[in-house]
Amino acid sequence: MLLLSGLNERERFLIFLLFFIPIFLIGLVFLFQNLSSPFYEQENYIMIHFMLEIVCVIVSFMIAFQALVIYPYTFRRTGIYIGALFLSIGILGFFHIMALIGMPHFIMESSNHVSMWFWIAARITQAVGLFVILTFPKTELKHSLWEKRTFVYISSFVYSLTWIAFIYIYSPHLPILYVANVGTTSLNNGFEYLMMFLYVIMIVLFVKTYNRLDKFSLAIVLSLFYLIVSGWMFTHYNDVHDIKNFVGHLLKAFGFLFFGYALYITSVKRPFQMQRELQIKLKQHTFYDDVTGLPNFRHFNDKLAQFIQQRKSFGIIMFEIHQLQKINNSLGQALTNEILKLIAQRLEQSLSNQYFLARMTGDYMAVLMPNAKTEKELHAVCNQIGIIFDKPFKTRNLELMINISVGITIFPIDGNQSELLLDNAKAALDEARLNGIPHLFYKPEMRSKRYNKLLLENDLQKALENKELSLVYQPKIELTTGKIYGFEALLRWNHRERGFISPSEFIPLAEETGLIVPIGDWVIQTACKQLKAWHSIDPSLKMAVNFSFRQFYQTDITEKIKKTLEETELHSDYLELELTERLAIEIDVWYRQEFCVSR
């Protein structure tokens, strides 16, 4: 049973049945051995014998052709040797059929004696050839010609011609293998027993080699078993019209079919299954997100294009998952992936199956809502998504609250192209995030705001080079004495076209884009230089500089500040870095999360 442990119950039953059939036939044959078979009498013998033997010949040529054509892609050298072997078996089997009395004259007059020698030549070739190939599959042949298909097949053909010439030329001098109404001779039976012995050895080696027999090895073992039983039948019949001879030919034909099926498994079925599995994996990798298992951006785009072609109203809900980047920076990618999986699971469980949920890129996900026509329908789904994020996500003894911003577009009101619809949904999402609103529907004026924001971002990148940034210093006064004890450096931007721009407009943009890091470095350097100049008037003055969260997370921030203080010859006591309330909260959350993880 261990050998068949890889099969299901139905397959095991089928295997036991196939092994039982030859044994059952043997019992029937010897139980009713005196009962003649009317359909196997002399007038039917030629046709039935021809049909059974031609099956073996066709299977042999199919194996030879299959190995020749498919060998470079699936087989190793073993496959091409088996193909060449069955080419010889097919040729000799064909001559056996054509040389039988009752068949049209072929090359020379038909003769049972010649036919029997072609028969035994084919069977010896098959048994010895299979024994050598299957028993020593890893034997390396030093001559490189043996690796070439053409040479191997030509050698097989020459081998067959040698047998044909030998039998036709020396047939008068060859021993008799069959005597009418008596049966096969001892020489023929000796050949048959030798072949059965080789087949038994091959079965034993197969069982020992494989702890679990797969379909390929089972088909080989079945083939060998049927050939053994058929060979035993061929040693016990007294006349060619005997039922034993018929059953022997029938089992031999099935033995060939099983071997053909085994080669079909290795050359066609397995490669096809492997290709199909590869296609499934490729599709999974191409159209699905590796972390969440959700459809990815490419799949979403294809689905969106299909919806647009249908010309029916539908909605797109796009949402950005906040805190993921911070979680990734402080707790690592593995935990971030766990959070993403939890989010995907909740969304899949809560949202209707008719909605198409996908992970877009990074922190963004989106939902396609077919047949959504009104804002009310979309608003209800947005609230449903919002409820999902109202509860904390628990993983690794942590409870993390995740916030989202949602943007919504409706086809065809907000666009009739995929790119435009997604861009508008992103514009609505950005507007919702900036205004602290859970979700917003797209409005045309949002595009102009995004365009202006893009221009402002581009100008901000050049502001330092163009010397448009400056600092103003707000005095810090001791209330009891009225004395100025320090200053706070405040950043201002005098745009070359728009004039002064409010810090509340450009500082969040600088933090969002990362420009706050180089700008922050410039602010610290400039403020320290100014403080050093003022120390000539009052050496006790201090300078306060606002510190952003992006600056805080720099790995080399300590070295940067230390270098600035050295260059300006200031002591660290005179520089104050003011942490915003937002940054203080983030640091506190990060510390507690790190502490929990370490524990």
Image (tube, rainbow, N blue to C red):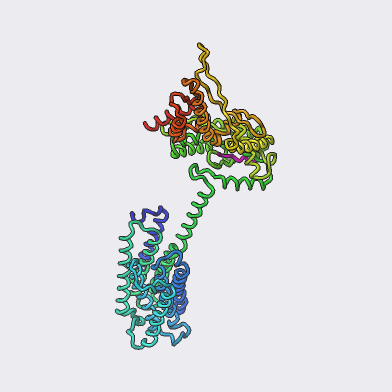
Which quarter of the picture shows residue 127?
bottom left
Furthest residue toward front: 536
Q: Is residue 358 left or right of residue 173?
A: right
Q: Quadrant of the C terminus?
A: top left
Number of numbered tags placed on the structure image: 0
Residue at (36, 53) in percent of width and height: 5
Q: Residue 301: x, y in percent?
A: 60, 46
Q: Position of residue 246 (x, y in %)?
A: 40, 73
Q: Tell me where residue 79 sits by quadrant.
A: bottom left
Q: Main secondary structure of the magenta part?
A: strand
- Find residue 72 and report its horizontal and vertical position in percent: 45, 67
Q: Left or right? Give the position of 424 relative to 583.
A: right
- Give coordinates of residue 317: x percent, y percent: 61, 37
Q: Quadrant of residue 219?
A: bottom left
Residue at image location 33% in from the left, 56% down from the top: 211
Which stretch did the figure color magenta?
A: 364-370
